């Protein structure tokens, strides 16, 4: 077994204390090229450059009349609409309703999917009993399930939370199973050499080794949650961002429709940033995440 493999297992949480400090030097991940002149803050500013330029061009085209307000209102008008709706309280109410639906659906669907992923990842018997059915349900489009879900739950909160839970379940399930199955066999062999019990192998090697894949599933699930919620809130909703968009469509309020799209985009960026923060916190031991940044 190579020195790199030996060092990699020592980087897993709780194993560093089993070896002398001299052998626990961290292995760095592959370096990503970036000129020295660009620090983290400069790179963050550059990541927002393209969206800001797009908004600026959009504003110029709208103000000069190349884009009519009926087709696409100016960003300044969208901001004024957002301020007006926020001051009346309706925007915050709808936003809070949508966030609550997404959070409850994410917790329910994510918890069930994580449990099934752990079960299938560790057991071939569980895979034979569960995986085929999960993959068949995953292949069914949301819109095809919508009539049946309405029959089951009506058009109340249950229908919306169920669709969100269903949407977030599949990315977490697949990535949890894949992460467990892809743990390096050499690390398991070294764990046995170290004298770890089965429980210690699971908690110190397998689950930490699968964590990057699991968190990738969480990032995909966060995006899917909002996609599912958009579909759910177009049917019989009395509050929420999707309801706000559908109500504005009836009155040809393109400024409100664009506002809801911008809100979805901003929530998506915030959710992805939260997932990245989780990666940096939970994978501080990993050479390609927290360890490489030190």
Image (cartoon, grey):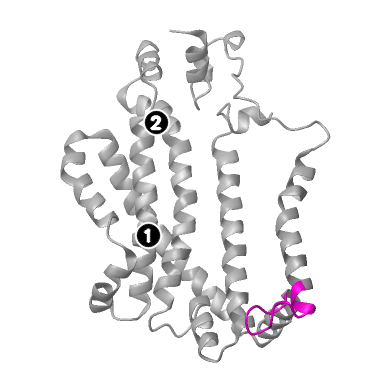
Residue 202, percent from left and from top: 35, 29
- Residue at horizontal 28%, vertical 68%? 144
Q: Which residue is mark 2?
A: 203
The verdict on residue 62 being magenta is yes
Looking at the image, residue 127 sits to the left or right of residue 258; the answer is left
Packing grade of label 1 (10 A; few <14, some 14-19, many >=20) is many
| Relative vertical location of residue 143 with respect to residue 118 in this rendering, above or below | below
Give the mark count: 2
**Which stretch appears magenta?**
61-74
Could you say which is closer to the camera, residue 262 or residue 193? 262
| Relative vertical location of residue 212 with respect to residue 80 in this rendering, above or below | above
Residue 223, percent from left and from top: 49, 57
| Relative vertical location of residue 73 with respect to residue 131 in this rendering, above or below | below
Could you say which is closer to the camera, residue 97 or residue 146? 146
Q: For the view shown, which residue lies furthest in the front direction?
A: 66
Callout 1: SS:
helix
The verdict on residue 167 being magenta is no
Q: Find the distance from the CA under tag 2 to the CA under tag 1.
A: 28 Å
Residue 60, percent from left and from top: 79, 72
- Residue at horizontal 56%, vertical 60%? 268
On-image quarter of the C terminus: top right
- Residue at horizontal 54%, vertical 38%? 282
Residue 110, quarter of the rendered image: bottom left
Please, what is the dominant secondary structure of the magenta stretch? loop
Callout 2: SS:
helix
- Residue at horizontal 58%, vertical 14%? 24
Could you say which is closer to the camera, residue 261 or residue 229? 261
Residue 196, quarter of the rendered image: top left
Q: Which residue is mark 1?
A: 167
């Amino acid at each position: 077994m190579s020195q790199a493999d030996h060092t990699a297992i020592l980087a897993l949480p709780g194993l560093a204390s089993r070896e002398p400090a001299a052998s626990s030097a961290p292995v760095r991940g592959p370096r990503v090229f970036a000129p020295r002149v660009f620090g983290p803050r400069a790179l963050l500013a550059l990541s927002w450059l393209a969206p800001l330029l797009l908004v600026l061009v959009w504003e110029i085209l709208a103000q000069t009349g190349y884009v009519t307000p009926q087709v696409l209102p100016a960003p300044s008008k969208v901001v004024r609409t957002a301020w007006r709706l926020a001051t009346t309280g309706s925007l915050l109410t709808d936003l809070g309703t949508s966030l609550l639906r997404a959070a409850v659906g994410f917790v329910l669907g994510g918890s069930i999917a994580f449990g099934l992923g752990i079960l299938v990842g560790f057991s071939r018997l569980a895979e034979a009993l569960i995986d085929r059915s999960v993959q068949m349900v995953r292949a069914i489009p949301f819109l095809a399930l919508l009539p049946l879900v309405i029959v089951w739950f009506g058009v109340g909160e249950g229908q919306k939370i169920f669709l969100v839970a269903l949407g977030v379940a599949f990315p977490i399930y697949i990535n949890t199973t894949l992460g467990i199955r892809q743990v390096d066999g050499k690390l398991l062999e070294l764990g046995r050499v170290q004298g770890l019990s089965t429980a210690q192998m699971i908690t110190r090697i397998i689950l930490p080794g699968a964590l990057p894949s699991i968190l990738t599933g969480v990032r995909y699930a966060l995006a899917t949650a909002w996609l599912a919620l958009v579909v759910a809130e177009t049917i019989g909703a009395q509050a929420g961002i999707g309801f706000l968009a559908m109500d504005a469509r009836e009155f040809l309020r393109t400024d409100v429709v664009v506002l809801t799209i911008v809100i979805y985009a901003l929530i998506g960026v915030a959710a992805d940033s939260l997932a990245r923060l989780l990666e940096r916190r939970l994978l501080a031991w990993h050479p390609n995440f927290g360890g490489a940044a030190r």
